Image (cartoon, rainbow, N blue to C red):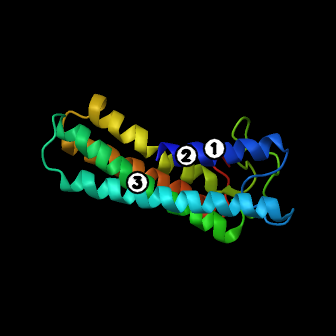
């Protein structure tokens, strides 16, 4: 899994060095189409491995860590998978901006659109549940019920951000 992520990030860095886009780049030459297609293959393989890992975490019954931590890991993987599929929505649209064009000026550092809906925000928040929910299970939740509450609030919040973007509304309006 790590090698797949290094390969994908390497392709993104290569395209940045080449001063071109890495995602949705299908109009500026066959090499860029090949790079974007290869990135898609990498993500499909990565997601298949994530699903296998999720199944393994749900099948295993005995852990040497707290149940809240285990559930944080399990739910983090599940949320990661769910919100990774949002990337497929962006690919099917060949765009991440709803109601405007990609590449317009946006928020500092992340360049998320501050004028239109931007699918990258919910995608980012959703996939980083992979880190946040295990941390919540390890350090914040007193028991599994607390973790389930945190996870529910997080899921609903990220889903609300996704719905807002799909309506073409910027994160901060």
Mark 1 vs 3, N-terminal side: 1
The image quadrant of residue 169 is bottom right
Query: Could you tell me how far apart the alpha carbons at marks 2 and 1 are, in whole angstroms?
Result: 6 Å
Q: Determine the residue positioned at 18% across, 51% down.
A: 60
State the residue position of label 3: 79
| Depicted 163 relative to depicted 61: above or below | below
Neighbourhood count class around disc 1 (C-alpha, 10 Å): few under 14, some 14–19, many 20 upward: some
The disc, 2 or 3, on the residue closer to the chain's N-terminal end is 2
Decide: few, some or many residues near mark 3? Use Cα within 10 Å; few <14, some 14-19, many ≥20.
many
Q: Secondary structure at mark 3?
A: helix
Please give the name of the residue rendered at 60% of the width and 46% of the height, measured from the top-left corner: 7
97 and 44: which is toward the camera = 44
Mark 2 in CB contact with mark 1 (< 8 angstroms):
yes
Q: Secondary structure at mark 1?
A: helix
Image coords of residue 157 (percent x, y): 46, 51
- Residue 85 at what x, y percent from top left? 51, 63
| Gap between marks 2 and 3 measured at Cα | 18 Å
- Dot 2 and dot 3 residues touching (CB under 8 Å): no
- Residue under label 1, please give it: 9
Percent across and percent down for residue 97 are 71, 59
Residue tagged 2: 5
Compared across the picture, whether 99 is left or right of 88 comes to right
CA neighbours of label 2 inside 10 A, class few (<14), some (14 to 19), many (20+): some
Q: Is residue 100 shown left or right of residue 130?
A: right
Please state which of residues 2 and 111 is positioned toward the viewer in this rendering: 2
Whether residue 154 can be seen here: yes
């Amino acid at each position: 899994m790590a090698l797949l992520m290094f390969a994908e990030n390497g392709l993104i860095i290569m395209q940045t060095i080449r001063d071109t886009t890495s995602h949705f780049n299908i109009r500026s030459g066959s090499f860029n189409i090949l790079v974007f297609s290869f990135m898609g293959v990498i993500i499909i393989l990565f997601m298949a491995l994530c699903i296998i890992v999720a199944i393994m975490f749900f099948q295993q019954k005995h852990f040497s860590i707290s149940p809240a931590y285990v559930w944080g890991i399990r739910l983090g993987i599940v949320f990661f998978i769910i919100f990774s599929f949002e990337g497929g929505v962006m690919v099917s649209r060949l765009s991440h901006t709803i109601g405007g064009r990609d590449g317009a000026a946006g928020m500092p550092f992340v360049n998320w659109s501050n004028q239109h809906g931007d699918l990258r925000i919910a995608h980012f928040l959703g996939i980083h549940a992979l880190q946040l929910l295990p941390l919540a299970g390890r350090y914040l939740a007193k028991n599994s019920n607390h973790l389930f509450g945190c996870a529910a609030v997080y899921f609903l919040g990220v889903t609300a951000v996704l719905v807002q973007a799909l309506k073409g509304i910027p994160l901060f309006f």
